[in-house]
């Protein structure tokens, strides 16, 4: 099966500072792919770079950036804007500020369909109401006429999701969509995304730092560290047989009922994600890694640790 | 929303009453009006006659309430110098000043909004710096001086426009340009900073993620939010311009309310002075009220909370 989204060796720099250093990942049609990692590891920048939404000063380079078989790395802003919102959509971490305070929910939703499909106002309103119902919003007619400040955070994120679905996209990139919401609402939003993915055959790239979310929703996981994807595997495989020391550290930080006894200390990874100076070579995790050795300052091989399981490490740690 | 309007309206009325009282008291503070009206060669008897004729011998409080009661009905008394009803004088002159103010504001908006938007979109570029330099120069330039320069260049040297006086549209061009110059810097800076803030906001990122056109992103989503403070400042600027037209109208000899104010102050025609101050202040108060209401119209968070 060919990949819906294929990213190879993505590099993003902001004025000489590298934020993403050769990240590769692929999202297949109808698959939920989770990108996990600590704050500052380059997850969000990766997702914005894919959409061509980097902030001013961000430089993007990639040996391949393909969407549905088409190379989109060289597309100009006008061509990209034709794809965005139509075939690839995105939702963000900040539901409180991501909607324009000056326009109603209806106005902001309908403009997507009118822009990409040339729909009439009435058609667009019908579609918007249908999708608000689809994401579990009651009284869609009322909500369409309301302004963002009249809605709660959970409702706004549902509106964002419904808005992203206006043109039936093939790919949905969700950048920590539940981080700003309280726990019960988080669960609702995740269930909603999983349901949409199943019903609409959407490919989802979900950025998160929450391994609980990953376990519940992901088909495949890529672990990011300091701007690189250090390990990528099907979800069950990754949780059962983590190979990269960083992945193991991350998993050790999560309390699992039944496995962790009361009073036992939880795992943690000492230190923080380092700033990577230009010309840095070797493994960026080596200063925090228990297994570090001389070879970690040299080129790091990417090797297969099983079917669909790739690790960026000098060691081949056994499961 | 109704409460918001009522509150603003009450404040506006209180401010108007304060201005009314101040304009009455200030004219009385400038000395004995009967003496100054009578002139330097008048006898004691003349002064006494004038005092009685104009009712200046009554207690101050009585004069005040008399004047207030009539002013509220639109009767400002009679001018000492022009021998006409003050209300008539102002009714003849006000359209000239209002036209001049609106021309000035329109010119200012036409220049300031596009330049502010362009400067924000190209923040830090040479265009941006050039625009900010223009703003600085505009802010630093005294308006009477700019008026004289324009008269020399456009009026005398090129002969394109009449140098001074009151008449058709061509008489409004130069004073309008001069007047607009005082408003352009603040409007432009405000547009620029509002746009910079709007363009770096999350909802602009959303608009881009939706694949909207550049025009829609900049104007519909960006400027719509940046415009909210600009609209209130524009309304207040118009108030400043109407007040500031005293200088411009004098320089260009336009017979508007500003020129009337200058004439009546120099002639000690205090019913006219009081009335002009009051009318300009009322317009200013009305414009501020209008700015508040426009804000509520533009910002749904104000309107629906």
Image (cartoon, coloured by chain):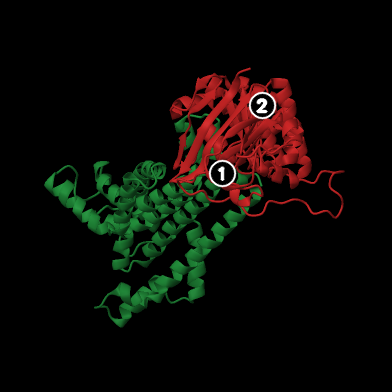
Are labels 2 and 1 assigned to the same chain? yes
* Residue to which mark 1 is pinned: A295
Percent of width and height locating residue A129: 69, 26
Residue A137 showing in the rendered view: no
> As displayed, is residue B38 above or below residue A192?
below
Q: Is residue A180 found left or right of B46 in the rendered image?
A: right
Quarter containing the C terminus of chain A? top right
- Taking depth in this image into account, of A230 and B292 the one nearest to the observer is A230
Residue A199 showing in the rendered view: yes
- Taking depth in this image into account, of B31 and A216 the one nearest to the observer is A216
Is disc 2 surrounded by few (<14), some (14 to 19) or many (20+) residues within 10 Å? few
The CA distance from mark 2 to mark 1 is 25 Å
Query: Which residue is farthest front?
Result: A294
* Residue to which mark 2 is pinned: A308
Percent of width and height locating residue A17: 47, 47
Q: The green chain is which one?
A: B
Chain A colour in the picture: red
Chain at numbered mark 1? A
């Amino acid at each position: 099966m060919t990949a819906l989204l294929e990213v190879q060796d993505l590099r993003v720099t902001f004025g000489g500072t590298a934020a993403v250093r050769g990240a590769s990942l692929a999202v297949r049609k109808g698959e939920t792919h989770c990108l996990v990692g600590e704050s500052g590891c380059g997850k969000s920048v990766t997702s914005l770079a894919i959409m061509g939404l980097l902030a001013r000063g961000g430089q993007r380079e990639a040996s391949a950036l393909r969407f549905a078989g088409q190379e989109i790395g060289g597309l100009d802003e006008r061509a990209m804007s034709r794809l965005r919102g139509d075939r690839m959509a995105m939702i963000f971490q900040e539901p409180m500020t991501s909607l324009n305070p000056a326009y109603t929910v209806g106005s902001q939703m309908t403009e997507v369909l009118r822009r990409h499909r040339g729909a009439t106002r009435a058609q667009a309103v019908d579609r918007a109401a249908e999708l608000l119902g689809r994401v579990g919003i009651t009284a869609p007619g009322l909500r369409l006429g309301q302004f963002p400040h009249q809605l709660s955070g959970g409702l706004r994120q549902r509106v964002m999701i419904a808005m992203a679905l206006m043109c039936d996209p093939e790919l949905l990139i969700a950048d920590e969509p539940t981080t700003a919401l309280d726990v019960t609402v988080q669960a609702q939003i995740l269930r909603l995304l999983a349901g949409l993915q199943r019903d609409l055959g959407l490919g989802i790239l979900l950025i998160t730092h929450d391994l609980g979310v990953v376990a519940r929703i992901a088909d495949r996981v890529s672990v990011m560290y300091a701007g690189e994807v250090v390990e990528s595997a099907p979800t069950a495989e990754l949780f059962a047989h983590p190979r990269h020391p960083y992945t193991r550290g991350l998993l050790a930080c999560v309390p699992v009922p039944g496995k962790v006894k009361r009073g036992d200390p939880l795992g943690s990874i000492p230190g923080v994600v380092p700033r990577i100076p230009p010309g840095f070579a070797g493994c960026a995790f080596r200063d925090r890694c228990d297994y570090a050795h001389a070879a970690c300052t040299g080129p790091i091989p990417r090797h297969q640790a099983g079917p669909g399981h790739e690790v960026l490490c000098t060691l081949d740690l056994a499961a | 929303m109704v409460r918001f309007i009522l509150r603003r309206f009450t404040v506006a009325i209180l401010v108007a009453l304060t201005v009314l009282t101040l304009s009455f008291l200030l004219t009385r503070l400038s000395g004995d009006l009967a003496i100054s009206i009578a002139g330097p060669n008048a006898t004691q008897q003349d002064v006494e006659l004038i005092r009685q004729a104009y009712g200046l011998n009554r207690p101050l409080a009585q004069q005040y309430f008399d004047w207030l009661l009539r002013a509220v009905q639109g009767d400002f008394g009679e001018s000492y110098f022009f021998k006409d009803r003050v209300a008539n004088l102002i009714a003849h002159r006000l359209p000239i000043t209002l036209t001049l103010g609106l021309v000035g504001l329109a010119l200012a908006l036409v220049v300031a909004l596009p330049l502010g938007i362009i400067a924000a979109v190209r923040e830090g570029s040479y265009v941006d710096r050039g625009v900010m330099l223009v703003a600085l120069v505009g802010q630093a330039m005294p308006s009477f001086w700019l008026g004289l320069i324009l008269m020399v260049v456009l009026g005398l040297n090129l002969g394109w426009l009449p140098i001074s006086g009151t008449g058709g549209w061509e008489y409004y061009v130069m004073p309008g340009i001069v007047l607009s110059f005082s408003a352009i810097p603040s409007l432009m800076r405000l547009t620029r900073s509002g746009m910079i803030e709007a363009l770096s906001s999350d909802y602009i990122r959303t608009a881009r993620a939706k694949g909207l056109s550049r025009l829609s992103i900049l104007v519909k989503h960006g400027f719509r939010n940046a415009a909210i403070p600009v609209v209130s400042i524009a309304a207040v600027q118009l108030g400043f311009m109407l007040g500031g037209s005293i200088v411009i109208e004098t320089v260009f000899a336009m017979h508007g309310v500003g020129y009337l104010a200058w004439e009546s102050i120099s002639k000690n025609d205090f019913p006219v002075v009081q009335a002009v101050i009051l009318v300009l202040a009322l317009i200013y108060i009305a414009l501020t009220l209008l700015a508040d209401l426009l804000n509520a119209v533009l910002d749904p968070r104000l309107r629906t909370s």
